[in-house]
Image: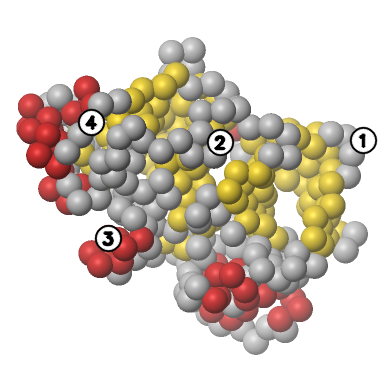
Amino acid sequence: MANNRHKDYNNNNIRHLLSFRPIYKNVLWGGNRIFALKNEPAHSSNVGESWEISGVEGSISVVDGGEFNGESIENLVSRFGADLIGNKAVEKGCRNFPILVKFLDARLTLSLQVHPNDTLAFSRHNSGGKNELWYIIDSADDSDIICGLSAPLTPETYQKAVKDHTILQYTAKYNTQKGHFYYIPAGTLHAIGAGNLILEIQQTSDITYRVYDYNRCDSDGKPRQLHTEEAIDAIDYSFPPAKLSGELHPLETNNTIETPSFNVNFLEAHPCDKHCFKHDGSTFTIIVAVKGSAKISIDGEGKELCAGHTVLVPAAVPSFSIEGDATLLTVTL
C-alpha cells in the first residue's frame, strides 16, 4: 500500500535516482520468467505482469530505498510537480505520473483486446487513453502477436464476427523476434501470443476492453468478462492500418521512436563507453535494463541497474551518465 504521508522537502532533494518496488500481477496467462529476468527467486506463480513505475489508481508505485523510501509516486508528483515530471506534463495538466512501465510474461495467449483513445476514455472513465509500445525481450520460436486488421472491418461485421467467434479472421498476426518492437496505438485490436516476454511502455491507464478470450474461464470456473459492446466505438476500423514509425522493424542502436505520448530510445552500452545525457526541465527520463548491467550516475554518485530493473531520473536532474555492458531503453515525454 502506498504511503500517503507528506514531508517538507527541499526541491533540490528530488535530484536523485528513484527506484520503485515492483507490483506483481498474478493472472491465468502468466508464468515465472519475470523473476528469471530480474535474477530473483520466484516467490509466486502465474505472474504475468510486473509494474515497474505506475501512477494508476489502485496500483501506485512506492519508492524503494533512499531518502524517499516508502513514499508514493503520487505524493512525489504532488509535492515536486515539474521538478519530477517536467514542464511538458505540467503544461498538459497531468496530476499523476503519465507513463506506466511493465514487464509481461505470456505463458498463454492473452485475450484479443482494444484500448480507448483519450477522447473516449475521458468521456467514459474520466481517464486518459492507452497508447502502448512493446519491446520483445524474448520469444519462443513459434511465438506471435496479433496487431491490427488483415481485412476490412465495420462495426456491423465486427458484431457479427464476435457473435460467430470468427473475429480472429479479421486480425493480422506476426511472428515475433527478440529485439523487435511494435507500437500499438489506442483503437488497435491486439493480443500477445504465448511464449513472449515483453517490456511494455504505455500511457498511464488500465482501461482494457476484452473482445474475445477463446471461451476461457477464470480461477472460479466462470467465463471471463468480455467488453464487446464497449469496444464497438473504441476500435479503429481503418484499413489498411497505418504504418507507424518503427513498426515491425528491429530497433537500432541509439534509435529514437517517437509516438504521440512518449519517446523511446534504444541503447547498447559497452564497457569502454560513457553515454552522457542532459535535461532541459521539459521531461523526466525512465531507464529500463533488459540485459546486462550498467551504472547510472548523477554528480559522481552512481547506482547499478541490472536486467529487469528500472530507475527514474527526475526532470530537475540537469545531467546524468550511463556506462557498463547492458541493453537499455530510455523513455521520455
- For the residue marked with disc 2, what is the amino acid? Gly
Q: Of callouts 2 and 4, which one flags the residue occurring earlier in the amino acid sequence?
A: 4
Alpha-carbon span between mark 1 and mark 4: 51 Å
Location of mark 1 (residue): 272
Where residue 206 appears, as percent x and y from the top left, is 36, 54
* Marks 3,2: beta carbons within 8 A: no
Q: Quadrant of the C terminus?
A: bottom right
Q: Nearer the viewer, residue 150 or 2?
A: 150
Where residue 133 appears, as percent x and y from the top left, is 49, 42
Location of mark 4 (residue): 152
- Given the current orientation, which residue lies at the most extreme top position? 141
Q: As displayed, is residue 49 above or below residue 301?
A: above
- Marks 4, 3: nearer the viewer: 4
Can residue 7 be seen here? The reply is yes
- Marks 2, 4: nearer the viewer: 4
Q: Of callouts 1 and 3, which one flags the residue occurring earlier in the amino acid sequence?
A: 3
- For the residue marked with disc 3, what is the amino acid? Leu
Write the residue at 23% across / 31% down.
152
Mark 4 closeness class: few <14, some 14–19, many ≥20 residues within 10 Å: some
* Kind of element beneath mark 2: loop
Location of mark 3 (residue): 120
- Marks 2, 1: nearer the viewer: 2
Write the residue at 42% across / 61% down.
56
Q: Of callouts 3 and 2, which one flags the residue occurring earlier in the amino acid sequence?
A: 3
* Kind of element beneath mark 3: helix
